[in-house]
Image: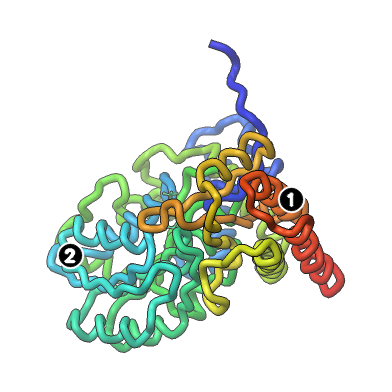
Amino acid sequence: MTELRVPSRILMGPGPSDVDPRVLRVMATPLVGHLDPAFLDVLNEVMALLRQAFQTANRLTLPISGTGSAGMETVLVNLLEPGDRAVVGVNGEFGRRMADIVRRCGAELYAVEAEWGRALDPSAVEDALRKAKNPKLLAVVHAETSTGVLQPIPPLGELARRAGALLVVDCVTSLGGCEVALDAWEVDAAYSGTQKCLSCPPGLAPVSLGTRAEEALLRRKTPVQSWYLDLTMIMNYWGKDRFYHHTAPISMLYALREALRLVEEEGLDRRFCRHRLHSRAVCAGLEAMGLELFVPEPWRLPTLTAVRVPEGADDLRTRRALLDRFGIEIGGGLGPLKGKIWRIGTMGYSCQPRNVILLMAALEAVLREQGLGPPPGAGMSAAAEILADGERTG
Ligand SMILES: *Cc1c(COP(=O)(O)O)cnc(C)c1O
């Protein structure tokens, strides 16, 4: 077998995103043991940086070994016991996945649905919380990557509190890309993933539990169903006891530390601003090409744009041409949206002017070849104009 060679790509799909070269470099750092005093410093630094990114003082803030779904499963299996009632917002693939895990925990599911491409209606959430009578938790997706919808969290915090439920938020595609303020929003538990807006390879899932969630965990009558994801044991490694539970993925933790350092250096506000600017440029470019955005204005994600596959365009052929000829990856639709939308990520290191401009030019070329007639150069110039505006106003 030959040495591994993969083509060079620009990752503008729903994740993974491109990894900053600085993160790739630290991954080549030689290993130390997972109980080496030098590595224990790394653990503490990662926890401190994660608290900054989540905007929380939560003691129990650490990365779980596994991808974003492991974060989702960790939060739900640790907080839910058989017979508990849980209200879950389902307006996309990841809400569905939470609902599935809730059932597997032996908890009673109260789903609040909304049309895919729309946010949940707080009054429907309120009804479900009432119907569930004393629900243990309310779980929602902040940034629904399958549809491109941003769910406003603050109104839901208030509702959960009044119902005596813990608020659980999926921040996989928002952490490091748009405002996530766990303490200000009174979120009780949240999780994320490293390969979206943090621009780190997939493999870790930052989670954070507040005091109310931690108390609920310590009050459990039954042991956590998952041995590997049991936070009561994991926290004895990350806390001062340093008990061995499982071997920490050392190189991934080096990588996350560097990715979070990049977030800190850029500053949260500037980083959020950069994501908003580039997604606005993508939206403007797509609309100038005559394409229709899937999500109405108030709910558009600043980290991922969903756009309808235009009539007459071949979904697969278009994405394949972008990949083969321009090296650009964008995502297709999931579940009921398969073949209906494209998902364009502008996350982390991928969120750069040159990527947006290249995608506009490439997409225009590929659509024109299929007999569609976006006006030549329209997408590119509309996007460039927004980016130049942002450049001027900072
Ligand atoms: C990607 C994603 C997940 C799952 O993360 P994996 O790393 O693929 O396991 C969960 N929730 C949302 C909103 C996501 O975008």
Q: Which residue does the numbered mark 1 point to in the structure image?
A: 361
Ligand 1 within 8 Å, label 2 CB: no
Looking at the picture, tell me which residue is in the foreground, 129 or 241. 129
Seen from this angle, which residue lies furthest left? 83
Q: Is residue 382 left or right of residue 149?
A: right
Viewer-side residue, 276 vs 45: 276
Instruction: Label 2: state its secondary structure.
Output: loop
Measuring from the top left, give residue 87's x and y in whole percent: 26, 73
- Classed neighbour count for the residue bearing mark 2: other residues with Cα under 10 Å, few (<14), some (14–19), many (≥20): many
Quadrant of picture, ligand 1: bottom left
Q: Which residue is mark 2?
A: 107
- The residue located at (41%, 57%) in the rendering is 337
Above or below — where is 3 with respect to 205?
A: above
Residue 298: horizontal and vertical position, in percent?
Answer: 55, 79
Q: Residue at x 43, y 75 (%)?
A: 119
Q: Earlier in the sequence, mark 2 or mark 1?
A: 2
At label 2, the amino acid type is Ala
Q: Position of residue 221 (x, y in %)?
A: 15, 64
Toward the front, the furthest residue is 371
Residue 362 position, x and y percent, is 70, 47
Q: Amino acid at mark 1?
A: Ala
- Drawn side of residue 134 relative to residue 349, left or right: left
The C terminus lies in which quarter of the figure?
bottom right
Q: Quadrant of residue 122?
A: bottom left
